[in-house]
Image (cartoon, rainbow, N blue to C red):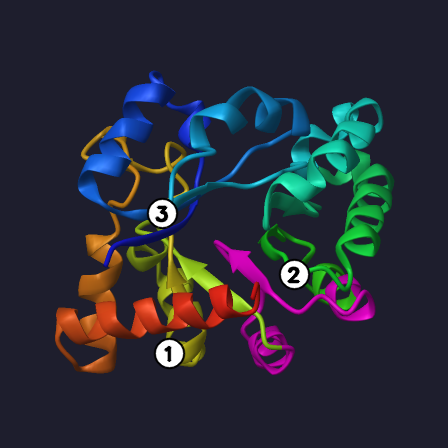
Amino acid sequence: MIIDTHCHIDLYQNPKKKLQDCVKADISVLAMTNLPSHFEMGYAHFQSLKKIRLALGMHPLMADSHKKEFNLFLKNINKTSYIGEIGLDFSKGGITTKEIQIDTFSKILNVVSGQKKVLSIHSRKAEKEVLELLVKNNIQSAIFHWYSGGLNLIDAIVEAGYFFSINPAMVKSISGKKIISKIPKEFILTETDGPFISENELPIQPGQIQPVITFLAEEWMISSDEVKKIIWSNFQNIIKRLK
């Protein structure tokens, strides 16, 4: 019952082997892509897999490629029920392309509105704007990946029915712990965001979410097995929306 709802398998050194490792370990993974062209390159390798799904993405920090890739996004949208990584990033690294990001994100949400899709959302320094656009476009199923926004917005995100995916880096920081403690347990999922997080000076592996399970067990004062059951139930609840 290992659930990794946000992992970039295609960005590891040997993606094919990493994918085989995930199959052998029998873990459930939502594999993100950063651009539609990356989705096209990987799609054939994921098609026959039951527990590992490839998501169609348009990363906000790759806004310079959005215009030329958007038609590819539309071309591939019916090949998957999972959309990600998409969203907005108004941090120092992304603020210069703010208008392009908003335009692309708005178009994507408009296209998927009313469709049965699960979205994995990037929202750094743009959490309020992301939430407003999701609600405006009547998006039913979204997961705020590695949320780092204000505590005061969490209730509104939950009220909209959206989930949060928690990774090992979050349980190591004071701000991350505060965020996690504010989220109702039925809205929490696990992720690694591999290979962007390191464990013991090595890139974190897909499904390496035990630090999160351990932290939640202490936070909720229940056993690790009970935590896994709750995460599994939450994952099933969001997957049911696709049916």
Tell me the kind of residue under disc 2: Lys
Is 128 or 86 nearer to us in this picture?
86
Q: Which residue corresponds to the image point at 56% horizontal and 78% vertical from the top-left?
A: 158
Q: Is-magenta flag for residue 29?
A: no
* In this view, 230 is above or below 205: below
Tag 2 and tag 1, C-beta contact below 8 Å: no
Q: Using the rendered image of the protein, determine whether residue 216 is visible from the camera's viewpoint.
A: yes
Tell me the kind of residue under disc 3: Lys
Query: Toward which corner of the image does residue 77 lie, by quadrant?
Result: top right
Q: Residue furthest top?
A: 13
Identify the residue under disc 2.
116
Q: Which residue corresponds to the image point at 19% horizontal and 36% vertical from the top-left?
A: 24
Residue 128 relative to residue 52: left or right? right
- Report x, y in % for residue 160: 65, 78
Query: Toward which corner of the image does residue 57 lie, by quadrant?
Result: top right
* Segment tinted magenta in the rendering: 133-160
